[in-house]
Amino acid sequence: MAAEAAPQREAAPAPIMAVRGLARAFGGIRAVDECTFDVRPGLITGLIGPNGAGKTTVFNLITGFLKADRGSILLRGKELLGLAPHEVERRGVVRTFQHLRLWSKMTVLENVLLGCATPMGESVFSLFLRTAAVRAEDTRARERAMEVLEFFGLAGRRHQLAEDLAYPEQKLLSMARIFATDAPVMLLDEPASGLDGESLRRIVPQVRRLVEHGKTVLLIEHNMELIAELSDVVVFLHQGRVLAAGAPAEITRDPALSEIYFGV
Amino acid sequence: MTAYLAHYLVMVGIYAILAVSLNLLIGYSGIFSLAHAAIYGIGAYASALVALKLGLGFWGGLVVAAGVGAFASALVAIPSLRVAGDYYVVASFGLQVVVLAVFMNWTDLTNGHAGLPGIPRPNVFGWVIDEPFEYVFLSVAFAALTYAVCWRLTNSAFGRVLQAIRDDEIAAQAMGKNVVQVKIVVASISSALGAMAGSLYAHYITYINPSSFALHESIFIASLVILGGSERLAGPIVGAFVLLAIPEALKFLAIPDTVAAPLRQVIYGALLVAFMLLRPEGLLGRARTQARDGR
């Protein structure tokens, strides 16, 4: 069942990413099984489901960290399956991790700079042969990184090590560094997990602002209130299959889905 | 005494090149290599052979040495770095053993244990460098060049990627960094520089044999990095100054040669253990991260 566009929209935009018949088994366990859904541009799509539903496996399959047994993931009509993780990023899909995976011994600014495009600075030949161009690129990257840090309210922390930030700020940094890339599709793995009420009030509007700045968001989240508040479309996953997709109100009110999710 | 001091400084320069280039792998990329002596040897033999058999001069030998060193390293890096960093330790150990076996057994080419004598002194733009004192300039100039190359690499976006790979390879991949390619490139650059040190050594001593490039030499070069401090570019240079001074200091004590050699190994071993326990960051200590992105 494919996700419908948000009901408030007159005409559903064409999907930016189309997941079709995605499957992946670990031994005898089908972690993802004929999973099909759409991610539409400029919207927040929430991927929900009980523990073990296969949500993170779907993220790992999309981003190339796991190989799919079958299926297809089309980004603007081009196949992503079979690409290495760095190639997926270059095609335009970036992700955060549940356990953040920040470069903890590097500064906040360095973490974000690694998201900024610096192809010449990363090329050994350009480093030695095109020094002026590399310097200009570095200046642009630093300006971009500072804009991103301002956007996430982390500019004042730029010289601190990532490990020295408070947990909510580390969450913001994990989003900031992928926002700094030019990738249009952002996959957020539980952006609100482990946060208290006050921190949530800081993170939630930030996720909404990502979309306002032209990004498309696919997020995994367990907090149903947050899903209802944030998502334009919800995809309900159970035992690796998409059971339902639609507007958050429809999904969260469905008694059958609630029973699967909450066991009541 | 001047010649003695000059010899010490020449060797410090050569080992500084080896240690700084190895630190690109150990300190900046988190890749531990046990083959740097083999790479050093490849550089020495390549340079000596092209000088003796093809009559190629110092500069030609240097270029050939760097090229062959980088190629040998890439040959091992391409399959082993595709999997995980730890495999490189084993693969580099294999390279060390194989290369030494080639030096010892391909007698038609390398003259086996007897080694290659009569390697010509370098001719640098018409200036034949045949005094240790003159060689200090050459050795220090190449050490400075190595430092400059490594400084440029590590203080750049490329250096940031290296550190990102070292600290969390998966995060680096997710951020679009081609981890395997970067590792192969850095292993090749490190080896090209290490092989260059071999070329300098061959033209300085004018005689090479396999014993100079054995496994214990790889461990010694790694010790220079660890004791000097792998988190700073200058750490391994300090390591070279200090550790090369130890055998020289022993010469001033009334110890027979048969005791001095094993004693040297005991001192190196004890120092390594002591540093691991008391000062794991090495003599120069940790880099102040905050200063790194200050402009």
Image (spheres, grey):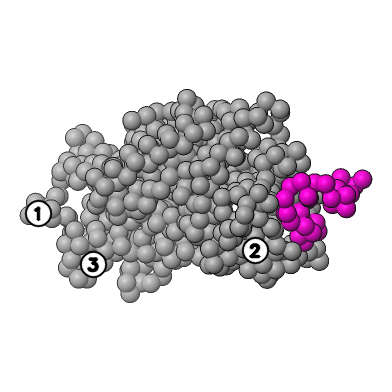
Tag shown at residue B5 = none
Same-chain check, marks 3 and 1: yes
Residue designated by label 1: B125
Instruction: Read off the magenta span.
Output: A235-264
Q: Amino acid at mark 2?
A: Val
**Which residue occupies 71% across, 34% down?**
A194
Residue B11, visible in the rendered structure = no
What's the residue at 56%, 54% (across, down)? A41
Q: Position of residue B4 (x, y in %)?
A: 23, 38
Q: Residue at x 56, y 44 (%)?
A: A211
Dividing the picture into quadrants, the one containing residue A264 is top right
Q: Is residue A75 magenta?
A: no
- Give the letter of the chain under mark 1: B
Question: Which of labels 2 and 3 is toward the front?
Answer: 2
Any mark on residue A19, and which? 2
Q: Quadrant of the C terminus of chain B?
A: top left
